[in-house]
Image (cartoon, coloured by chain):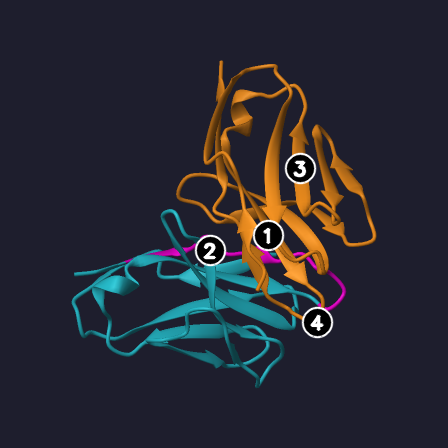
Amino acid sequence: NAGVTQTPKFQVLKTGQSMTLQCAQDMNHNSMYWYRQDPGMGLRLIYYSASEGTTDKGEVPNGYNVSRLNKREFSLRLESAAPSQTSVYFCASMGLTSSTQYFGPGTRLTVL
Amino acid sequence: KQEVTQIPAALSVPEGENLVLNCSFTDSAIYNLQWFRQDPGKGLTSLLLIQSSQREQTSGRLNASLDKSSGRSTLYIAASQPGDSATYLCAARNFGNEKLTFGTGTRLTIIP
C-alpha cells in the first residue's frame, strides 16, 4: 500500500517550458487535491477533484490545468512555466468516510 | 473567508518539557480541524483530527483541543523528545466545503 505517490521528486524548468506533475493514490479515495507550499504562505489549494470526472478551482488556479484521468490519478500541468511557480507541490487524497487528507511526498519545482 | 493563524512561527524547548502549540481560526462554522506534522523536505502526516462536535482528541503523547466559540485549537505535546522536532500545521475545513485552509505552521525544535 503505497498511499499517495508523486513524480517527479525534483524538476528544474526554464521560463516558458511546460511539464506535468503526476499523482496517484491506491486507497480508493474519491477526492484528490493539488497544493503548493511557499515559505511564509502555508499550503494553498490550486485545484481539487471531488470525484472522477470533476475538477474545481482552488485559491490559486491561474497558470495551471488539471486532469482527473481516473479514480487513482490526478495530474497537474504547467503550460508555460513562470518563475513565480517555483514552489513545492503536494498532492493529497481523501476518502468518503474519512475527513483525513493523506499527502504525497511532494515535487520540488524550480523555474529559472 | 476562513483564515488560520499559528503563532509563534518557531519555538524551541528543552527535552522533557510539556508544550502547547496554538492555532486560531476566524470562521467558527468549521466542520473539523486537523493537525499535521511536516519533517524537512517531506510531505504532511496527519496527527489528529477533531470533528466540530468534539472538544478534544488524544493520540499517545499528543492531545488536541477545539474551542469553536473562541476560534482556537491547541496541540499539547507531553514529555517532548528530540524526535518531535518538526513543523506542525493546523488546517480548518468548513461545512459544505471540501477545502482545507492551512495555517503557516510552527517550527518546533526540541533541544536535547
Q: Which residue is mark 2?
A: A43
| Rendered location of residue B97, percent (x, y) | 65, 70
Residue type, mark 4 in image: Gly
Q: Are marks 2 and 3 on the same chain?
A: no
Amino acid on which the number 1 mark rests in the picture: Ala
Residue at (54, 61) in percent of width and height: A92
Q: Mark 2: which amino acid? A: Leu
Q: Which residue is at a point 42% across and 69% down the rendered structure image?
A: A60
Residue range corresponding to the magenta coloring: A96-109
Q: Which residue is mark 3?
A: B74
Task: Say few, some or many: other residues with alpha carbon within 10 Å of mark 1 (under 14 / 14 to 19 / 20 or more).
Answer: many
Residue tagged by mark 4? B96
Across and down, in percent, residue B17 comes to 61, 16
Query: Residues under labels 4 and 3: Cα distance?
Result: 24 Å
Q: Work out which residue is located at the far right of the displayed protein and give it.
A: B53
Per the picture, the main secondary structure of the magenta-coloured stretch is: loop
The disc numbered 3 marks a residue on which chain?
B
The number of numbered badges drawn on the structure is 4
Q: CA distance from mark 3 to mark 1?
A: 12 Å
- Chain designation of label 2: A
- Separation of marks 2 and 4 at Cα, in angstroms: 20 Å
Q: Are marks 1 and 4 on the same chain?
A: yes
